[in-house]
Image: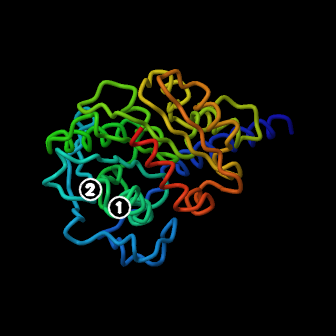
Amino acid sequence: MKKAGIVILYCLALSSCLRLDANLFSNKKVSAYLFDANHATQEISLDSTYIIPAKLTHLIQLVSDDNGDKVTIYGIYLGDTASISKDTVIMYFHGTKDNMDYYWNRAKLLANTGGKDRFGVLMIDYRGYGMSSGTPTESGMYADAKAALDWLRDKGLSGNRLIVYGYSLGSAPATYVAAETVSLRPSKLVLEAPFASAAVMVHDAALLAFPPSYFTNLKIDNSEEIKKVQQPFMWIHGINDDFLNINTHGEAVYKNYQGTYKEAWRITGATHTNVPTVWGMENYKNALTAFIMR
């Protein structure tokens, strides 16, 4: 019985490993994007005042190279591509679920922050998501982020007018590009519902005292990476987050920031996916605009 128990625990550990990695990259492939025509799945709802004119909506293709593993990734740019060199642009890294269709209203909300079509917004699908080819990996996600920044740089954008916004899973590439040497260094960092690390996810989710390596091969550690970030930092987290606990994840990232300026927004009653709705769209937009313009 004792040996049987050990085998059962070992199998549970292995199956949990597969579940955690799969949950972190919960990608959905599509042959075409629906965007405004996608009524079945949208993380948040917006009224018609947030609609982006067709002339300001641009589907783009980029080549992302992860140490020789080259894939084609897709992105959507909201704004006038001819004015990128003069605009303020928000690079939005979305969460783990589905693809860009699911986060389309998030991108529209950011574009309309501070006024109608105020900011340019670039959102990408990581490899393996949506129409992007390849398979999701941690290193591939960082390569995809760098490909997006290269595109903005080639369009003439300078780092002092680039804001990077990472939500949930997107907190990893967002923190990475703010902390590391990349082609276009952002001027400010916004993280919504960030996770501290893959190890903390294991500790929060696991009932067994196994090392994190039994549950995931991911090495993501935003709570350490944030220590390298010097740019102004805005942190937003729902107090009732039921996916990434605010205390074990968000607070750890916020506490470890050692840069020039930081501000925290702990949203009462908000869970993982509904911060803008519970906070109130105007409150959300006003706080974000004030941070961007400070």
Amino acid under disc 1: Gly
**Looking at the rendering, in which quadrant would you find the N terminus?**
top right
Q: Which of 227 and 112 is in front in this view?
A: 112
Residue at the farthest right position: 1
Answer with mark 2 or mark 1, whichever residue precedes in sequence: 2
Question: Is 219 drawn above or below residue 119 in the view shown?
Answer: above
Residue wearing tag 2: 74
Residue at 23% across, 51% down: 72
In x, y percent, where is residue 59? Answer: 23, 62
- Left or right position of 239 against 112: right
Q: Nearer the viewer, residue 262 or 67?
A: 262
Residue at 72% across, 41% down: 206
Q: Image quarter for residue 32?
A: bottom left
The residue tagged with tag 1: helix, strand or loop?
loop
Question: Is 277 drawn above or below residue 243 in the view shown?
Answer: below
In x, y percent, where is residue 232? Answer: 45, 31
Residue at 70% across, 31% down: 210
